[in-house]
Amino acid sequence: MATSAEIARGIFDALAKKDLDAALAHNTEDSVDDFVAIGEVRGRTAIRQFFEELLAAFPDFEIAVERIVADDEAAAVQWLASGSFSGGPFRGIEPTGRHVEIRGVDVMEIEDGHLRHKSIYLDSASFARQVGMLPRTDSVPEKAMLSTFNALTRARQRLNRTEKSSRG
């Protein structure tokens, strides 16, 4: 039987080749992909649909494994994914044509050669900035957004203090 590290490497090698059959070979209908920034995707069919949407949205999608750390029952894979958001929509977001580069880590729980649960950690704010949903870091629009947010927060705090003192 393949080790956790070998299974993890095989999954990522297949994904890099856009071979979803091979990438999902260790998944079952009970498998869960928990994209911490997005939400859970349950079962092989739904996980396949997620990756089909991803590959359609990023036609030049590439993923490279930077590091794998594993034991008998788990593997952690640090990766770098990139591509141009020039295909179809992704998670309800229309394509912007912009190039995206995202780093992440998958923590895979593997039992008897089956991928039971995968927690995927990625920087969704970086994705949002790169596709244009959020302003670039340290840009004038970001500073204006931050200033507005902080002004609203201070106003809510003053309102809450006023309401508390009028009740007390």
Image (cartoon, rainbow, N blue to C red):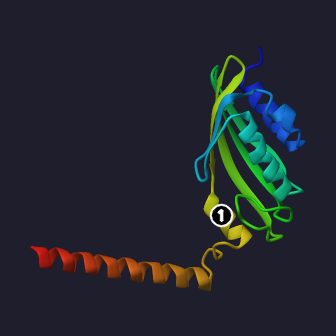
Q: Quick one: quadrant of the N terminus?
A: top right
Q: Is residue 112 above or below residue 163?
A: above
Q: Is residue 159 above or below residue 99?
A: below
Specify whether 84 is left or right of 115.
Answer: right
Which residue is at the front of the view, 79 or 61?
Answer: 61
Specify whether 17 is left or right of 53.
Answer: right
Which residue is at the front of the view, 138 or 131?
Answer: 131
Q: Is residue 144 above or below residue 84?
A: below
Q: Which residue is mark 1?
A: 126
Count numbered badges in the picture.
1
The amino acid sitting under disc 1 is Ser
The image quadrant that residue 30 belongs to is: top right
The image quadrant that residue 95 belongs to is: bottom right
Image location of residue 72, percent across then percent down: 64, 19
Image location of residue 93, percent across then percent down: 72, 65
For the point 84% across and 51% down, the residue is 55
Specify whether 42 is left or right of 8.
Answer: left
Image location of residue 42, percent across then percent down: 65, 38
Which residue is at the front of the view, 109 or 4?
Answer: 109
Specify whether 4 is left or right of 152.
Answer: right
Which residue is at the front of the view, 51 or 66?
Answer: 51
Image location of residue 44, percent across then percent down: 73, 34
Q: Is residue 58 above or below residue 2?
A: below
Q: Quick one: quadrant of the C terminus?
A: bottom left
The image quadrant that residue 151 belongs to is: bottom left
